[in-house]
Image (cartoon, rainbow, N blue to C red):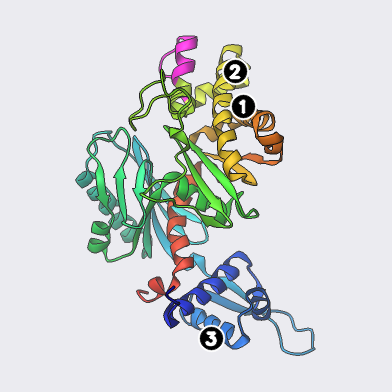
Amino acid sequence: MKGKNQRDLKEENTSTVLKLVKDNPGISRISVVRKTDLTPPTVSRIISFLLNQGVVSETPGESNKVGRKPYYLKFNGDKFKVFAVEMSYTQVKFAMIDLDGKIYHVETVDTSTDISNKELFDLILQYFKEFEDKLSKIFAIGISAPGRVDPEGGKIIRIPNLKNLSNFSVGEIARVIDRPVFVMNDANAEALAEMFFGYGRNVNDFLLVHIGFGIGGGIVLNRKLYNGNFGVSGEIGHISVDMDFGIECDCGNKGCIELYASVNAILKAVQKQIRVENLTLDKLYELLKKKDKLVLNIIQERSRMLGNVLVSVADILAPQRIIIAGPVVKISDYIIPQIKDTLKKRSFYGFGENIEVVSSALKENTGLIGAMSVVLNEFLEHPYEFIAQK
């Protein structure tokens, strides 16, 4: 096996220190040494480098009159602004967000399902220039998109129902703006957002389930996002619940769970049952608050279907926590109890009773913070790639 060269080891050690400082604001140098097993001179060199680059800052604490005055470290995420792009099926959201997760400005643009590669490219460039001209210097771009995405190759390979958009390369954007650009599947990006800023912060293993127009999953194992292979991972929405007679899916399968338990599918089912037109998620929420029996029955039925799929996923992964994210958060109080009950009754010897099921802590901002978190994750893993360009 090929060993690590000096540069790789140097970056790995820098990444270790940087992650520790980010996750533990106010940590001291001696605590960094104790928690990393790195030598004091190595830690000192790394921190001096990060201080010189403005990535971290160090402030003196109160002296206890014994020994040296303590100094405390802080990650300067607020100094690095990211242009976050959150794609969905009918709109694109743009935001300026710093690496501490603070949102400065958001713009939403309605788009057509006929959007092409060139139209998306032009739209991103247009708003990037507007944001940088009006707000602040942009450090990098993070993009989240539904469907099949290749983060390593920097491509949106395919988005269901967007027929004119395929093999969209973010490298073309990077070449024009001369800034790093990263892309990731929306559920995976949201999993990173929860790991850094939400209910994934204090657990090692969790599953994020994005429920919107479709259903996707983001898997975090031992504090690392599982990316899978071939630009595919966590595609929970395409687990079939009726492979013989189910509804045909755009992915080529039949009976995919997202055709029954996504927000879109639930709205259609309720709309058909109560015979109303143009039902929205807000209107559905009002019906649920009024305890409309027909509506409640549909929600319970579709939630149990999703719960049955999550039992299979849980039997394989056994996550500590399942986080529900996406537009469905609006009605998640009516969905989560059914999922919990199904996990308890149908998981392997009932172990699913121990899995926490919660609604996203980031609410409607999960997607945008997720797009920014794609950049943050790269920055923490490969700091030299960014600092060299700084």
The residue labelled by disc 2 is 296
Q: Amino acid at mark 1?
A: Tyr
Label 3: few (<14), some (14–19) or many (≥20) C-alpha neighbours in 10 Å? few
Query: Could you tell me which secondary element the residue under label 3 belongs to?
Result: helix
Q: Earlier in the sequence, mark 3 or mark 2?
A: 3
User: What's the amino acid at mark 3?
Assistant: Arg
Query: Which residue shows up at 61% across the image and 27% down it?
Result: 334
Q: Nearer the viewer, residue 187 or 290?
A: 187
User: From what the image shows, is residue 138 above or below residue 300?
Assistant: below
Give the x, y percent position of residue 301: 57, 20
**In the image, residue 269 lies in the stretch drawn in magenta:** yes
Q: Percent from the top left, x then y, of residue 231?
A: 37, 49
Q: Residue at x 22, y 41 (%)?
A: 116
On screen, residue 200 above or below 82: above
According to the picture, the residue beneath numbered tag 1 turns out to be 334
Q: Amino acid at mark 2?
A: Leu
Q: CA distance from mark 3 to mark 1?
A: 53 Å
Magenta residues, start to end: 268-280
Distance from the alpha carbon under mark 2 to that under mark 1: 8 Å
The residue that disc 3 covers is 45
Total marks placed: 3
Badge 3 or badge 1: first in the primary sequence: 3
The percent coordinates of residue 218 (x first, y second) are 50, 46
As for residue 381 lying within the magenta part, the answer is no
Cβ–Cβ under 8 Å for marks 2 and 1: yes
Residue at x 60% of width, y 39% of height? 315
Q: CA distance from mark 3 to mark 2?
A: 60 Å
